[in-house]
Amino acid sequence: MTIKESSLSELQAKIGYEYTFDCVQCGYCLPACPTYETMEKETHSPRGRINLVKMAAEGKIPLEDLREPIEKCLGCQACVTACPTNTQYGRILDGAKEVLNETDNKSNTQKVTEKVVFEKLFPSSKNMDLLGHFMWGYEKTGLQKVARKTKLTNLAPLKLGKFEAVLPSAVSPKERKSRKNYYPANVDTNVTVALFTGCIMDSTFFETNQNTIKLLNLAGANVYIPEEQTCCGALHSHSGEVNQAIELAKRNIEAFEQYDISYVINNAGGCGAQLTEYNHLLVNEPDWHERAKAFSEGSRDISSILWELGGVHHELKTKEEVVTYQPSCHLTNVQKVVDAPKKLVENTPGVTFKPMKNEDRCCGSAGIYNIVNYDDAMDILDVKMKDVKPTNPQTIITTNPGCLLQMKMGIKREGLEDRIRAVHLVDFLAERLG
Ligand code: SF4
Ligand code: SF4
C-alpha cells in the first residue's frame, strides 16, 4: 500500500465513507432540507454534501471544498427522516466535521473561543453556575438596561447581542443554591428517575429545570439530580471535537450509574439526542460500550415520560389559549419523539391546538448555528415565521432552549411581541398548575 493509499483509507474510516454508498442519489431528501431551500445550491443539499464527502474521501477534490457546505449544514437530520434508503447522513456529517476540525484552518480567535467555551465553561458546573450568577447580577443591577439603551450589546461578538434581548429572566444565586439532590413524588410510586440538567439549560433556564422536577413529581416519579453530571457534549460533537465529547459522555455515564433509576430525563431536544448517541460515540471502547448502551437506552425526553406516566392534565387549570408547536429537530429526527409533546398540548384544558405547516422544518437555531451563521439562520427563520403566522397563535410551544430563543427572535423580527409569545412545553404546563 502506498502512503497516499494508506492516508486515504484512514480518512475514509474517519469521514464515514462507507455510509455514502447507501445514498442512491434519488433526491427525496431535497424538499426536506432547509438550506437547500434557502441557499438553492446542490452543494448545500444532503445529496450534494454526501457526494462531496465521497469525492473528498476518494481524493478527487481537496478537503477544503467540503468546508463551506458542511459548515452551512444545520445538522437537523430532516434528510435522514426523509431518506427511503435510511442513509445515515448524521454519521457522514459528524465524520466530515471531525476531519475538517483536524485540518486546523481556524483563526486564533476561533481557537481561543472554542478552548474557553468547550474546555473551561460548558464542562464545569462551577463555571456555568458563575455564568448564571453573572446573568442575574447583569439584570438586577440595571447593567442590562444601560447596555441595551446605549446599544453596548451590539458590541458583543458573533451577533450575541441580538440574542441577549430574548434571554429569559435570571434566577437568584440563593434560589439556585437551594436546589436539593432528591425530590420525592407526590404519590406512592416505584418510578424513580434522574434529571439531566444540562449546562446552558441549568445556567440560563434554571426555572424550566425546576418546573420539570415539579411535573415529574406530580406525574408520579421520584427525581434525583446527580451533582457530578456535566455538559452532554452535543456542541463538542457537532464542532468535530470528538475526544472532548467522549470524555464528557464518560463523566455523565459514571455520574448517573450511581443511582438506582429507571430513566435519565432531559428537557432539551438537542442534549437528549446527544445522550442517545453515547452508545455510538463509545462504540470502539470495549470497557464503556455496554455502559453507554444502557445509558442511551434509558434516556427519555420529558414529554415521553410525562405521557407514559399518564400526563398531568388532570392537575392543570383551564385557560383558553390558541397554541402552535415548533418541534425540535433533534427530538423528532434523532430521538424519534413526535407525538408525546403534541398529546400533552392537545390535552391541556382550554387549549386550541393549531399545527403549523411544515412544522418539522428546522427553525434555524441548530445548536450555535444561529450565532456563527447568523444571516443564514435568519433566512431560515423567516421561512419558518411564514408558516407560524397563518395559525394566528397566542403561544408557540417548543421543546428545546435553542428553538425557544430562535422563535422569540422570529416573533421580534416580525414585530409580533404584543400578540405572540414562545414558551418551553414544561413551563407552559407548569404555569397552569393550581
Ligand atoms: S440521502 Fe437518501 S433521500 Fe437523499 S438522495 Fe441520498 S438516498 Fe435519496
Ligand atoms: S441535516 Fe438538515 S440542513 Fe443538513 S443536509 Fe440534512 S436536511 Fe439539510
Image (tube, rainbow, N blue to C red):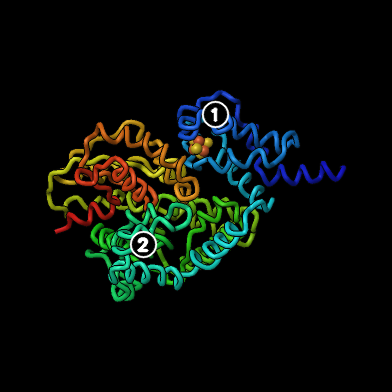
Q: Which mark is residue 400?
A: none
- Numbered label attached to residue 204: 2
Q: Secondary structure at mark 1?
A: loop
Mark found first going from the N terminus, 2 or 1 = 1
Tell me the amino acid under the disc marked 2. Thr
Q: Position of residue 131 (x, y in %)?
A: 41, 68
Question: Of the numbered discs in the image, which one, if any, rests on residue 41?
Answer: 1
Residue depicted at 31% across the width and 49% down the height: 308
**Residue 364 or residue 22, whichever sits in front:** 364
Report the quarter where the N terminus lies.
top right
On screen, 253 above or below 364?
Answer: below
Residue 134: give x, y in percent of width and height: 37, 70
- Quarter of the image with the C terminus is bottom left
Q: Amino acid at mark 1?
A: Lys
Is 264 above or below relative to 347?
below
Left or right: 29, with 332 as reference point: right
Question: Does residue 246 show up?
Answer: no
Q: Could you tell me if residue 285 is visible in this image?
A: yes
Q: Taking the image as four quarters, which one is ligand 1 found in?
A: top right
Crowd band around label 1 with a 10 angstrom C-alpha radius: few (<14), some (14–19), many (20+)? few
Residue at 68 percent across and 47 percent down: it is 14
Q: Position of residue 331 (x, y in %)?
A: 41, 45
Marks 2, 1: nearer the viewer: 1
Task: Specify whether 315 is left or right of 89.
Answer: left
Disc tally is 2
The residue lying toward the viewer, choosing from 231 and 88, is 231
